Image: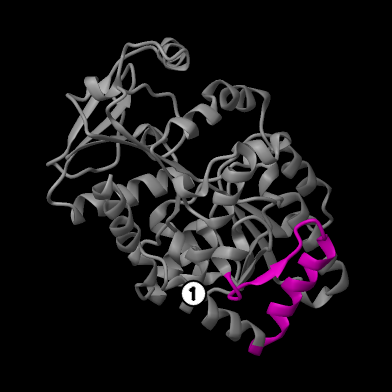
Amino acid sequence: MKIGVDIRSLMDKNFSGVSTFTYNLLLNLLELDKENKYFLYYNSLSEVNLPTLPSEVEVIRTSYPNKIFNYIMQKGLNYPKLDKVMGGLDLFWEPHFNFFNLSKDVKNVVTVHDLSFIRYREFFSQRKNSWHKALNIKKILNDADKIMTVSKNTGLDIMELFSIPERKIEVIYSGLESGFFDEISNKEKERVRNKLGLAEKFILSLSTLEPRKNIVSLIEAYNILRRRRPDLRAVKLVIAGSKGWRYQNIINSWHKSEFKDDIIFLGYIEDEDKKALYSLAEVFVFPSFYEGFGFPILEAMAVKTPVICSFNSSLSEVAGSSALLINPFRVKEIAWSISQLIDNNNLKEFYIKRGYDRSLNFSWQKTAKSYLETFNSM
């Protein structure tokens, strides 16, 4: 079987959750599947530094101007058919929503990570909302032969918001890189501590700096904690992640904080530094308003750092009872939860153990096996 894969998400300079998902699942699929032939597709006017891919796969690039390309795809015109561009396909897998056009006899699989742009349009820029509208998500879902989702919550959203029948949807959890379970040496921890200028004790948050991630509430919670607990002045708040849409509101909250000097922004974190960063933290806090999956909470759990996260969307589904769950709209609750894990060693150890055990259930090998079974059954 000839399988085409859209790898346009791998063109991102800094990987997000979708890029991480596509890359890791694709690598594990290629390692597992020795029967089918894979063709990887992207469109760019110039050469792109894609991540390392196995030499046996064929990477196909077109050089259409993106605006014209997307307009043609949006209108559903007969040319170009991506399966024809890729030399003829039996199945096409779209790891994330994008513009594409296929021949009618090609099986079509679409992965849906979340529908936050439908649930919470206010968390996205006008440009992003216009993009999502132009994509015509309803048509993409109706045309798909199979819809893969990364959580039951996302599956329920698809059924509720687009009236898609349950039989068309398959829930397959994302994986976790096996390297997160490797022991981290003290030398490696010190390297990252020195490189990033980390304090001896700190609370960590890692995500794109945008309204949906609720970082403003985390800063407010830290302010409350410090006012109530002068003894915790040595515990810093470290916020890691790239700047996203409307990040300025987060910066404004930081400027207004009387504990501004103890709140540190690290920016984008390289993969080689991520494990040690998680492991050095006293607690990892992820107070997001909505997530399709939530890679960071599993990554923190895998390196034995206790996790606090929101109970909404897919987060309680992924975390189970292995994280201290909070209401992201209640700032005082976030502050209280942090103090509990800092003060109570027994509670902290409880969530460390539960979190680590939970993270062991997620692997890219398992995810790839489930995807391959679905591909072969179509």
- Depth check: 313 or 349 in front? 313
Quadrant of the snapshot with the N terminus? top left
Q: What residue sits 28% from the left and 30% below the top? A: 106
Q: Foreground residue, 149 or 221?
A: 149
Viewer-nearest residue: 95 or 300: 95
Which residue is rendered at x = 35% and y = 58% of the image?
367
Left or right of 174? Residue 160 is: right
Q: How is the image coloured?
A: one colour
x, y (%) of residue 99? Answer: 43, 24
Residue displayed at 57% across by 23% down: 131
Magenta residues, start to end: 320-346
Q: Is residue 116 left or right of residue 318?
A: right
Rendered location of residue 241, percent (x, y): 56, 48
**Looking at this rendering, what residue extends furthest in the bottom direction?**
346
**Residue 2 lies in what quarter of the image?**
top left
Q: Is residue 90 left or right of residue 239?
A: left
Q: Magenta stretch: residue 323 in it?
A: yes
Q: For mark 1, does the 10 Å Cα neighbourhood hold few (<14), some (14 to 19), or many (20 or more) residues?
A: some
Instruction: Name the image quarter holding the C terminus.
Output: top left
Whole-percent x, y for residue 330 in the image: 82, 60
Q: Amino acid at mark 1?
A: Arg
Residue at image location 64% in from the left, 27% down from the top: 129
Residue 53 among magenta residues = no
- Determine whether the residue tagged by mark 1 lies in a helix, strand or loop: helix
| Residue that protrudes farthest toward the right in the picture | 228
Number of marks = 1
Residue under label 1, please give it: 358
Vertical position of residue 358 compared to residue 137: above or below:
below
The vertical placement of 17 against 79, above or below, is below
Q: Indicate whether 175 appears above or below 161.
A: below
